[in-house]
C-alpha cells in the first residue's frame, strides 16, 4: 500500500518564514516536520510514499532523496503551479498524485503539515477493513470546544459511521469535538470512481475542488464513510500559533540526555537534549523539554525552555528569557531580552532588553533593536531592521527585491 503526503501548499500564513523554507520542513522537535510524518508511515508499515509538491519545493526532494535513510521508498509528484492562487487544491492534488504515481488499490492520504505522535496507521487500516469502509477519517477529540471553529468536525453514529460533517462551525453549532486530522484511508473504488466524479462536478460548477470535508459530505449517503478517534498528540504547522504549539507538544516525546550534564541548572533533565558541545553558562537555567544544538551559547542568568529549540550557533545573552520558542541557527537574543512562543529565522536578532510577545516571527537576518517591543502576532520580513525602542504591531514588509538574494540558502534551519 502507498501513502500520498500532500505537501504542495505555499504556507502563506507562516510568512515570512515560508518565503524561503517549505512549511512542511520547518523544525519540529529538532527535525523537519514532514520527517515525523514519514516516520509514522514507516512505523505503520507503509514504506512506499509519494510526496505531492509544487515547483518551488525542490528542497524537500533534496532532503529526503529516495527515502532509503528512513527505510522507505519515496517518489515525488510536482504540480505545475507557482503560487497559492493557481494550485490544484487538496482534492485535485490527490487525484493528480495518484495518477502520476500509478497508484492501484487502497491508499492513505496525509496532510503534510500534520504533526502527530501516537496515531497508529496499522490500527486505522484494520478499522477500515473491519468496517468495509470506502473512506475512513482519523479523528482527534479537541480538549477545548472553541477550537472547533478552526477545523472540520464530524458526528459519528454508534458504529463509527460518519453521519454529519461540518467545516469550521461556530462553537455553539458544532455537532462534536471530533476534528479531522487530515489523515484518510481510501479504498480503490473511492479513489478511482468517487474522486474523479466529485472533481468533474465541482469544475462544472466553476469551483475549485479544494476542501476534503466537502468530498466526504458529498458521498455520506451513498458510501460507507467511517471515522476513528485516536488518543494521541496532534497539531500542524499552518500558522505561527499552531506551529509553536505543535513544536512544544512534540518536544515532550524527545529522549533527553541532560541527566549526566553538570555545570548548569536543569529542570526536567530527562526531556532536555544537548547535541554536540554548546557553551552553557554555569549560571544558566534550562527547563525541559528543550533541545540545544552544537555551538549554541547560553549566558549567565539566562532562562531557556518550556518547549524551546535552540539552533546551531545561536546565542542567548545573560538574563534573557526564552520560552516555548524556536530559534534557527545563528540567531541572537540579547542580554535581558524576552522571547515568548515565537520564531526567529536564521540570523535574526532580538536586541538587549527587547520584548517579543507570543506568536511573532522575525525573518531571516532581520533585527529587533534594543528595548524594542513586538506586539503579539507581529511579523518582521527578512533583512528588516527595527529601531531601538520601537513598538511594532502587525507586519513590517520589505519588497522582495531587497531581500530575496540574501536568503537563498540551502540550510533549512
Image (cartoon, rainbow, N blue to C red):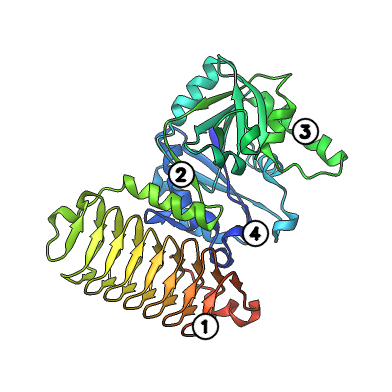
The residue identified by callout 3 is: 198
To which residue does mark 4 refer?
A: 55
Residue labelled with disc 1: 385
What whole-number distance in Å separates the C-alpha atoms at marks 3 and 4?
Answer: 26 Å
Q: Position of residue 305 (x, y in %)?
A: 30, 59
Q: What is the C-alpha distance between the residues marked 3 and 1?
A: 49 Å
Left of 208 or right of it: where is 284?
left
Mark 1 or mark 4: name the one nearer the start of the chain.
4
Q: CA distance from mark 2 to mark 3?
A: 28 Å
Q: Nearer the viewer, mark 1 or mark 4?
A: 1
The residue drawn where x is 56% and y is 25% is 227
Question: Vertical placement of 86 versus 234: above or below?
Answer: below
**Position above or below: 279 against 183:** below
Camera sees residue 47: yes
Q: Which mark is residue 271?
A: none
Real-space Cα separation, disc 1 to disc 4, in angstroms: 31 Å
Which residue is most to the front? 172
Residue 413 position by quadrant: bottom left
The local secondary structure at tag 1 comes to strand
Q: Earlier in the sequence, mark 3 or mark 4?
A: 4
Are the residues at dot 1 and dot 2 in contact (C-beta closer than 8 Å)?
no
Q: CA distance from mark 1 to mark 2?
A: 38 Å
| C-alpha gap between disc 2 and disc 4 | 21 Å
Q: Is residue 105 visible?
A: no
Give how far across and how far down residue 317 sits, in percent: 30, 76
Residue at figure coordinates x 83%, y 41% from the top left: 203
Q: Which mark, by number, is residue 38?
A: 2
Q: Position of residue 288 (x, y in %)?
A: 27, 54
| Spot occupied by residue 141 in the image (x, y as percentages of width and height) | 49, 32
Amino acid at each position: 500500500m502507498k501513502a500520498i503526503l500532500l505537501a504542495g501548499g505555499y504556507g502563506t500564513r507562516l510568512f515570512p518564514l515560508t518565503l524561503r523554507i517549505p512549511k512542511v520542513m520547518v523544525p519540529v522537535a529538532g527535525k523537519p516536520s514532514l520527517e515525523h510524518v514519514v516516520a509514522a508511515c514507516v512505523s505503520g508499515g507503509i514504506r512506499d510514499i509519494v510526496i505531492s509538491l509544487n515547483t518551488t519545493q525542490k528542497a524537500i526532494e533534496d532532503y529526503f532523496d529516495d527515502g532509503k535513510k528512513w527505510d522507505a521508498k519515496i517518489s515525488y509528484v510536482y504540480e505545475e503551479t507557482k503560487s497559492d492562487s493557481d494550485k490544484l487544491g487538496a482534492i485535485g492534488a490527490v487525484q493528480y498524485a495518484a495518477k502520476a504515481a500509478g497508484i492501484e488499490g487502497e491508499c492513505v492520504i496525509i496532510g503534510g503539515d500534520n504533526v502527530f505522535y501516537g496515531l497508529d496507521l496499522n490500527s486505522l487500516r484494520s478499522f477500515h477493513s473491519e468496517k468495509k469502509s470506502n473512506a475512513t477519517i482519523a479523528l482527534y477529540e479537541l480538549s477545548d470546544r472553541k477550537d472547533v471553529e478552526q477545523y472540520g468536525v464530524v458526528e459519528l453514529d454508534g458504529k463509527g459511521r460518519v453521519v454529519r460533517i461540518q467545516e469550521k462551525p461556530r462553537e455553539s453549532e458544532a455537532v462534536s469535538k471530533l476534528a479531522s486530522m487530515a489523515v484518510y484511508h481510501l479504498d480503490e473504488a473511492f479513489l478511482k470512481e468517487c474522486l474523479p466524479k466529485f472533481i468533474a462536478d465541482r469544475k462544472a460548477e466553476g469551483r475549485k475542488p479544494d476542501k476534503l470535508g466537502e468530498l466526504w459530505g458529498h458521498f455520506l449517503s451513498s458510501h460507507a464513510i467511517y471515522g476513528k478517534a485516536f488518543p494521541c498528540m496532534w497539531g500542524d504547522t499552518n500558522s505561527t500559533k499552531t506551529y509553536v504549539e505543535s513544536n512544544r507538544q512534540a518536544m515532550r516525546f524527545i529522549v533527553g540526555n541532560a541527566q549526566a550534564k553538570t555545570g548548569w541548572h536543569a529542570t526536567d533533565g530527562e526531556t532536555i537534549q544537548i547535541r554536540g558541545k554548546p557553551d552553557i553558562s554555569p549560571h544558566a537555567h534550562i527547563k525541559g523539554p528543550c533541545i540545544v544544538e552544537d555551538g549554541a551559547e547560553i549566558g549567565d542568568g539566562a532562562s531557556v525552555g518550556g518547549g524551546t529549540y535552540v539552533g546551531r550557533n545561536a546565542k542567548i545573552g545573560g538574563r534573557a528569557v526564552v520560552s516555548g520558542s524556536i530559534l534557527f541557527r545563528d540567531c541572537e537574543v540579547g542580554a535581558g531580552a524576552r522571547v515568548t512562543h515565537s520564531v526567529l529565522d536564521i540570523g535574526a536578532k532580538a536586541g538587549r532588553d527587547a520584548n517579543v510577545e507570543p506568536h511573532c516571527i522575525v525573518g531571516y537576518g532581520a533585527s529587533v533593536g534594543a528595548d524594542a517591543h513586538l506586539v503579539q502576532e507581529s511579523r518582521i520580513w527578512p533583512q528588516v531592521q527595527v529601531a531601538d525602542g520601537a513598538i511594532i504591531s502587525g507586519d513590517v514588509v520589505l519588497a522582495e527585491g531587497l531581500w530575496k538574494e540574501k536568503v537563498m540558502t540551502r540550510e533549512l534551519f
